[in-house]
Image (spheres, helix red, strand yellow):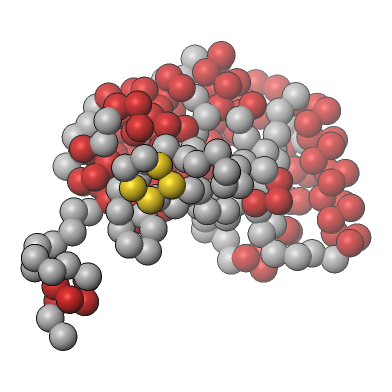
């Protein structure tokens, strides 16, 4: 079997990468896709406006830079779009009760969802890492916690962008989310929920 038939191409031409398709997407479609990675419209507009990106590292660097420069209202917008982190795998009832109480205490103290990147943790470590993070960060004053949350948002955005560009199984272009699909910011997502199809191709965003 030829490489072309392996990839499902009758013309023998390589399929454009997720980054190439992201670079070529209309501005509004790119912004909509990016909003599934970070809920700040200013951030999404800035990252989309600086296309084309020569490689993934350049895109991730632009994401970081745009995140560092977010004014407070835009950071608040991004935090408002988030749901509190929960482990993607079932946990014992007692553990879920403890997690719910911890989230409630955090949100009462800081007025927004607890955000934390779990990309560098094994699934079995997620629950303990979330609980430990909440306990530690509850001791922060509001300014410090806002800074920590902003850093976690940047880390989350990086991981989500990588998954966005990985595309669906067929590698088609990223596009705006389908409103019929689950919102990856819901607590049930546990940070890993597929995002749906857009008008010019299928993409998946795993939170």
The part of the image, by quadrant, that contains residue 53 is: top left
**Seen from this angle, which residue lies furthest left?**
12
Q: Residue furthest bottom?
A: 1
The residue closer to the viewer here, 41 or 66, is 41
Residue 38, percent from left and from top:
49, 34
The N terminus lies in which quarter of the figure?
Answer: bottom left
Q: Tell me where residue 18 appears, x and y as whole percent.
A: 27, 51
Q: Is residue 19 above or below residue 153?
A: below
Residue lying at 91% horizontally and 60% vertically, measured from the top left: 94
| Residue in front for this viewpoint, 195 or 153 | 195
Q: What percent of the width, then of the height, locates residue 78?
A: 56, 27
Q: Position of residue 63 (x, y in %)?
A: 37, 34
| Count of number-bearing discs | 0
The answer to whether residue 57 is seen in the rendering is: no
| Nearest to the observer: residue 105 or residue 96 | 96
Quadrant of the rendered image containing residue 65: top left
Q: Is residue 83 left or right of residue 26?
A: right
Residue visible at 33% across and 47% down in the picture = 201
* Relative horizontal placement of residue 174, taking residue 71 as reference (left or right): left
Is residue 207 shown to the viewer in this render? yes
Query: Which residue appears at 31% of the width and 58% of the height?
Result: 171
Left or right side of 178 for 145 = right
Task: Quadrant for residue 21, please give it.
Answer: top left
Examine the rendered structure and indicate whether residue 85 appears above or below residue 149: below
Asked whether, in this view, residue 4 is left or right of residue 151, the answer is left
Q: Residue at x 35, y 26 (%)?
A: 28
């Amino acid at each position: 079997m030829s490489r072309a038939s392996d990839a499902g191409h009758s013309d023998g031409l390589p399929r454009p990468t997720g980054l190439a398709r992201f670079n070529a997407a209309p501005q509004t479609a790119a912004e909509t896709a990016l909003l599934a990675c970070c809920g700040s419209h200013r951030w999404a507009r800035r990252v989309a406006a600086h296309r084309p990106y020569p490689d993934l590292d350049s895109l991730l660097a632009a994401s970081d830079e745009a995140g560092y420069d977010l004014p407070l209202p835009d950071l608040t917008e991004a935090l408002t779009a988030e749901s509190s982190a929960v482990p993607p795998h079932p946990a014992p009832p007692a553990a879920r009760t403890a997690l719910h109480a911890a989230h409630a205490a955090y949100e009462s103290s800081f007025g927004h969802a607890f955000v934390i990147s779990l990309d560098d943790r094994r699934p079995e470590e997620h629950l303990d890492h979330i609980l430990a993070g909440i306990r530690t960060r509850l001791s922060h004053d509001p300014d410090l916690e806002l800074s920590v949350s902003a850093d976690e948002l940047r880390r989350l955005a990086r991981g989500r962008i990588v998954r966005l560009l990985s595309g669906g199984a067929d590698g088609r272009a990223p596009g705006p989310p389908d409103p019929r699909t689950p919102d990856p910011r819901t607590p049930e997502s546990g940070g890993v929920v597929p995002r749906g199809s857009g008008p010019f191709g299928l993409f998946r965003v795993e939170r």
